[in-house]
Image: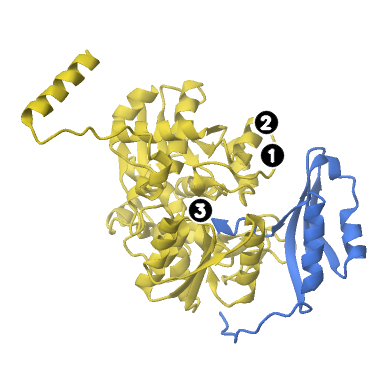
Amino acid sequence: MKALKCRECGREYPLEATHVCEFDFGPLEVAYDYDRIKKSLTRAAIEARPKTMWRYRELLPIAGEPTVGPLVGYTPLVKADRLAKALGIRELYVKNDAVNYPTLSFKDRVVSVALSRAKELGFETVACASTGNLANSVAANAASAGLKSYVFIPSDLEQGKILNSLIYGSNVIGIKGHYDEVNRLCAEIAGKFGWAFVNVNMRPYYAEGSKSMAYEIAEQLGWRLPDHTIVPMASGSLLTKIHKGYQEFTKLGLVAQHNTHIHGAQATGCSPISVAQKAGLDFFKPVKPDTIAKSLAIGTPADGFYALKVMRETNAAADDVTDDEIRDAIKLLAETEGIFAETAGGVTVGVAKKLIASGKIPKDSSAVICVTGNGLKTLDAVNGYCGKAKEIKPSLREFEALLAHEEKVNA
Amino acid sequence: MPTKKKVSITKPNSPVQQRLWLMYPPKLIKQPFIWEVGHKFKVTTNIRQASVTDEIGIVCLELAGPRSEVARAIKWLEKNKVNVEPVEIGVIAG
């Protein structure tokens, strides 16, 4: 790490818990000394390390060894031949963060980086505002690191999701009010108390954790970049960091220069970035979310502007899918590859299907679909859409009769 | 370094500074909202960034003043259909 740098004006700041430029309020990002990193970070050095995301630690924003989430990452890159056949593409992979450790979502990557850095900076209390995966990950990782945690949620959140954070002993605070009010209050709380708020004052470090997904994709493909990557967009941050990860690997000579395209996926019920991309705009208009893909339901995406820029620069597309298309895509992924993704995964697979069908992703190319969370977290979204179990009496004759009936129906 | 503070209850007239993004729909772009906010409420307005096109007006604004006045100013802007977000925008994540 070299410094924190404003994305707008380029001013540099010390590596502290701060996130906006004091001059133009632009977001700060971690800058690295790539010439120095290039000397030690080789393919052989990486391959000799344990299979976690920390094998790329020179490119992650911590000063010493990781102290939170030492086992996070290096999730499977599944060669998805059956899904490829269903979508009509030559070479397809699923980067499966539905089995990330410990809380079954890609958020474990960003949270373990943010909390490791928070410990280095001397924080004892960590916090976040979240409606799901981020809250679970902060609560779990803080518990295992012996940190005190506060999780802020809208008070009308489903009981199951609250339980997923309470179980780790986190202080869960439900806030009554509209989303906008809750959002502003959390920004104020983050500013007032001396805590490490993972996606506010720790945001520059937190967001960098996403790059590890890109590094793993490149290494697992045999040290090369795919032609296409399809990424779900909530704030748009993951898409920009996948791009940064690919660029860094290219700059360091770990992969060959490749004309790679990074496409964005949203739900139609919350698609400010995808709508702007399709209209050729370089800004988005805020929307009120209404979709089953709750983990992507951000109506005013913080990195929307930068995600649009990356899609323009990589000559990529964006699209969105309806709630029914999301459910169909979740089923398709489960039935072809045995992977049960949460709604955000349905969004990504559904959009991949659309982009391949429209020719925006050519059939004779290679693509990676990023699945960021586990289907067990959003069971309600598919409940009642997967058929029912067939019931019989404990009798062999009844079972045979059932099979005979099904053979007749399917004949 | 983080500091350990004793929690004190914030009073309505405690001075605050809030950093906000304002987003105007096209039909409101000609309205002098920032001038009006400065006159209607006891707040200081400080523009740090702005971008105005035919499609949208985006202003990055620092609002300073007594807590209750800043809160009233934000409510008034929202009543006038201006989208007001903290400078961090997406504090609540999925």
Extreme-top residue of the structure: A411
Chain under callout 2: A
Left or right: A398 as drawn, with respect to A205: left
Q: Colour of chain A?
A: yellow
The spot of residue A81 in percent (x, y) is: 30, 29
Which chain is in blue here?
Answer: B
Identified at 63% across, 34% down, the residue is: A275
Q: Is residue B10 above or below residue A228?
A: below
Note whether residue A50 is visible.
yes
| Badge 3 amino acid | Gly
In this view of the protein, which residue sits in the foreground, A393 or A360? Answer: A393
Q: Is residue A175 above or below residue A262?
A: below
Identified at 42% across, 66% down, the residue is: A139
Q: Quadrant of residue A13?
A: bottom right
The spot of residue A14 in percent (x, y) is: 60, 71
Q: Secondary structure at mark 1?
A: loop
Q: Which residue is mark 1?
A: A282
Q: Is residue A341 above or below residue A38?
A: above
Q: Is residue A99 above or below residue A284?
A: below
Label 2 or label 3, whichever lies nearer to me, is: 3
Q: Secondary structure at mark 3?
A: loop
| Badge 1 amino acid | Asp
In this view of the protein, which residue sits in the foreground, B56 or A173? Answer: A173
| Badge 2 amino acid | Ala
The spot of residue A408 in percent (x, y) is: 19, 14
Left or right: A325 as drawn, with respect to A203: left
Q: Which residue is mark 3?
A: B94
The spot of residue A373 in percent (x, y) is: 40, 48
Chain under callout 1: A
Q: Which residue is mark 2?
A: A279
